Amino acid sequence: QVQLVESGGGLVQSGGSLRLSCAASGTIFSFIAMGWYRQAPGKQRELVATITGSGTNYGDSVKGRFTVSRDNAKNTVYLQMNSLKPEDTAVYYCHGVLNQRNYWGQGTQVTVSS
């Protein structure tokens, strides 16, 4: 059973930083892609960042502020979020693709106050 467990969310002031972590129950080396999505109240889930063997990809609203990375030895994917804005407030979900199946974490809340 593959599990993804997020941590690191919380409350931060506008302009601040947070780092999210996503720990996988198995080796993340096997995942074709891993990354982060977010969903704000009343909005659809949207791409934040993904990382594959070919590189990284970011949503337009976070480019230049967020950085996704992975540590295969720790089976963990990270999302470093800098210059946070109130509009970044959302539940952030870890996502992975393994053997053509999508896996999701339970989500972690990020709240940015103005």
Image (tube, grey):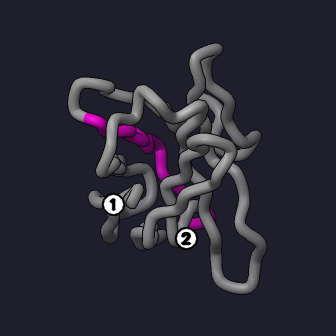
> Mark 1: which amino acid?
Val
Looking at the image, the residue that sits furthest to the left is: 74
* Position of the N terminus by quadrant: bottom left
Is residue 111 among what the camera can see? no
Location of mark 2 (residue) = 90
Q: Nearer the viewer, mark 2 or mark 1?
A: 1
Closer-to-camera residue (40/54): 54
Q: Provide residue 83's location: percent of width, then percent of height.
A: 47, 44
Give residue 5's mark.
1
- When the figure is inspected, residue 9 is found, relative to residue 17, above or below; the finding is below
Residue 96 image position (x, y, % from top left): 54, 47
Region in magenta: 75-87
**Residue 45, how many percent across, how many down?**
71, 67
Please tell me whether residue 34 belongs to the stretch shown in magenta.
no
The residue shown at (43%, 50%) is 15
Residue at 29% in and 36% down: 75
Query: Percent position (x, y) of residue 42?
Result: 74, 85
Q: Residues within 10 Å of mark 1 (few under 14, many from 20)?
A: some
